Amino acid sequence: MTFEMRRLDVAGMRLRVHHAVAEPVVAGAGATAMRRPTVVLLHEGLGCFELWRDFPQRIARATGLDVLAYDRQGYGGSSPLDRWPRPIDYLNRESEVVLPQVLDHAGVGEALLVGHSDGGTIALLAAAALGGRIAGIATMAAHVFVEDITIA
């Protein structure tokens, strides 16, 4: 398993991305590696990659799947927010514009989304926006509506 950190330029911002790449599964001698879904971790509204601690590596080791996590704009090692307060549809934009570009740039075809709080909402919205590209979702404390206080 290899671990890499890189920066991606997507949707007019620079995002810090962490990728745990598991060993490919090979079926028989000379066979090519089978493509499997990548687990994509979506952090909560006050978090960043560091708050996942060793969870990405543990998931990769336990499942044999690649794990991708990134800091959204305004968090961790990514670009600062360019607008404050955020627009009311910031979670929709993340799921419909930013996340698909992150997946494309990271070479992720099919994704298993794991999101907490804002990340859980992004996961649910992405399932609707990205359809068959999302193999599954696990959410913790996803929002069902956006309160004024969350954008101020």
Image (cartoon, helix red, strand yellow):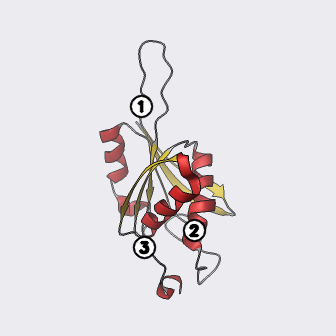
User: Percent position (x, y) of residue 34?
Assistant: 48, 28
Relative to 151, does residue 66 appear above or below in the rendering? above
Instruction: Please name which of the two marks, 1 or 2, marks the residue nearer to the observer.
Output: 2
Camera-nearest residue between 78 and 87: 87
User: What amino acid type is highlighted by mark number 1?
Assistant: Glu
User: Percent position (x, y) of residue 14?
Assistant: 63, 61
Relative to 31, does residue 68 appear above or below in the rendering? below
User: What amino acid type is highlighted by mark number 3?
Assistant: His
Density class for disc 1 (Cα within 10 Å; few <14, some 14-19, many ≥20) is: some
Relative to 54, does residue 14 appear above or below in the rendering? below
**Marks 1/2: CA distance?**
33 Å
Please, what secondary structure does the residue beneath circle 3 have?
loop
Residue drawn at 36 percent across, 59 percent down:
52
* Count of marks placed on residues: 3
Q: Which residue is mark 2?
A: 92
User: Percent position (x, y) of residue 50?
Assistant: 40, 61
Please, what secondary structure does the residue beneath circle 1 have?
loop
Camera-nearest residue between 2 and 26: 26
Q: Which residue is mark 3?
A: 143
Camera-nearest residue between 67 and 36: 36
Answer whether residue 35 is visible to the viewer in this image: yes
Query: Looking at the image, do the residues carrying marks 3 and 2 touch, with CB atoms under 8 Å apart?
Result: no
Q: Which residue is mark 1?
A: 23
Residue drawn at 37 percent across, 61 percent down:
139
User: Percent position (x, y) of residue 4?
Assistant: 49, 45
Instruction: Please name which of the two marks, 3 or 1, marks the residue nearer to the observer.
Output: 3
Q: Earlier in the sequence, mark 1 or mark 2?
A: 1
In the displayed structure, does residue 131 sit left or right of residue 49?
right
